[in-house]
Amino acid sequence: MAVMLAIGLWGLDRGGMWGDESVTFQVAQRTVPQIWRLLHDVDAVHGLYYLFMHAVLTVHPGEVVLRLPSVCAATATAGLVAALGVRLAGPRVGLWAGVLYAITPMAGHYAQEGRSYALVAAGVAASTLLLLRAVDGVGVRVWGPYGAVVALTCALHELAVPVLCAHAVTLALLRVPRGVWSGWGRAAVAVALLLVPLVWVSRGQSGQVAWLVAPGWDRVERLAGNFSPSPSGPVFWGSLLLLAVGLWERRTAAVALPLLLVPPAILMTVSQVRPLYHDRYVLYALAGASLLVAAGAGRVARALGRVRFDGRRMRVGGRRVHALLGVAGVLALVATFLSQLPVHRQDRAAAHRPDNLAVVSALAVRQMRPGDPVLFVPSVGRLAALAYPKGFQRARDIALRESAPRSGTLWGREATPGELRRRLATVDRVWVVAEPYALDPRWTPADPAERAKLAVLREEFVVREEHARDGVVLRLHVRRQPADEPPGVPPGAATTARLPVSRPAAPRARPRPGRW
């Protein structure tokens, strides 16, 4: 837990939020009625998390406070993984499993993200530990806390539901008596009934994950790299070998293997019909990989302890063997962490995330004059103004019709295409905040308002200035004058001419923040 806490706090203030974090930040600062209204139309899957973060950010609305719950949850998860290892295979395996979880880059990544995934991982680890206590005969009273923890975890993110299937496979592999099955079944049914309203509402909001695609074998390979302390090289292959050895530890494998394989397999299979899979949705399965690798290392350590030297048998319980194995384990973990130190450092740079909204605000402060109109293309770019309003205080959002909190949306309601054209007709200059894909002439948005923005910019304006940084483009467009048209070309023809039929495929838009 100390290792995970140190890794989580290291570089926690990156100097900028990215899109999904900004959604958490601005939604959590709304009033409870405003959050409740939002959840009726979007992001119901994150509703409980937003309400929790509303209470957290009441203390102090800042980027570090935004991420602290994830750091604490990841720290708890490392401790719970260690506790699972102790119960399954002893203190040494437990210690190794917890530290392996802590130093894995994927765990560190989501420990520093203002979203719910680290909290879900903690809930799954806690529920798995409660399941083991029930299997070991601690008592019937365990099923109540077990059901409550699973229900709370799935309410934080409903795609944690496959953990129930993983636990069912664990019970089958352990060949538990009928009484255990009965207790687990009642808890699972209670969880399912409690989640029905959430599933029903979020099912109507499934358009939020329309950007997901059916995963192929490349996603399986990527997930395997994420679940390892290193995505490639000797550390990866060594971890894979120890994981295979860990499968011989029957009791550990019965718990860890279903947790590792069942949730990703379920989501990937369902996603072949209706895409729902992303690596972050199965972060909680990482605990299974850490347990199996540690169990394999423990089995190797026991085998080394039985090797004969000079005709004498050295037992695992001997002080000398314990010391040697302890030193070897520490050196292996330190070497593993050091091999991934560049990855951890890179992950703590704001530029490593999909976007850095602080950069957008900084550019706006430097370039915009008081009263300048600003146009966000697409409208999701308005998250920069919501997360860092200081940079846009002097500007005028020319497309906004109703603010995000008042409209019950993530980034506000914009004017209709006709109204947008009328508003833009009244200005001679406009700043455009856009991502590069939105400025590519091959990009054709589905939203009529977005198409109207692009059409007016192409037909009536020309680019006077452009500033780009960290994947963000800020352009000053000024009204087109007759002299701006190429010689011999009718006004507007240069910008409205159709592209050739044999053009490259249109660029793919980046997933909009705030989606599952």
Image: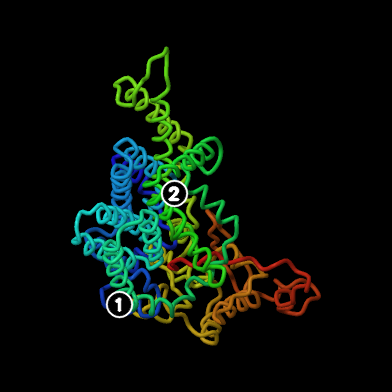
Image position, residue 22 (x, y; %): 39, 63
| Position above or below: 213 against 359 | below
- Which quadrant of the figure contains the C terminus? bottom left
Image mark for residue 36: 1
Outermost residue, bottom side: 418
Q: Which of these two is toward me, 345 or 389?
A: 345
Q: What element carries label 2?
A: helix
Q: Which of these two is toward me, 433 or 284?
A: 284
Q: Is mark 1 on a helix, strand or loop?
A: helix
Q: Which of these two is toward me, 434 or 483?
A: 434
Q: Which amino acid does label 2 sit on?
A: Met
Per the model, the C-alpha gap separating discs 1 and 2 is 32 Å
On the question of residue 7 being in view, the answer is yes
Q: Give the residue displayed 51% in from the left and 41% down from the top.
A: 240
Q: Quarter of the image holding residue 4?
A: top left
Q: What residue type is labelled 1?
A: Trp
Q: Mark 2 points at which residue?
A: 106
On the question of residue 366 being in view, the answer is no
| Position above or below: 309 against 91 | above
Q: Quarter of the image holding residue 283?
A: bottom left
Outermost residue, top side: 310
Image position, residue 415 (x, y; %): 48, 83
Outermost residue, right side: 488
- Which quadrant of the figure contains the N terminus? top left
Image position, residue 465 (x, y; %): 59, 62
Image position, residue 37 (x, y; %): 32, 79
Image mark for residue 80: none
Q: Which of marks 1 and 2 is in front?
A: 2
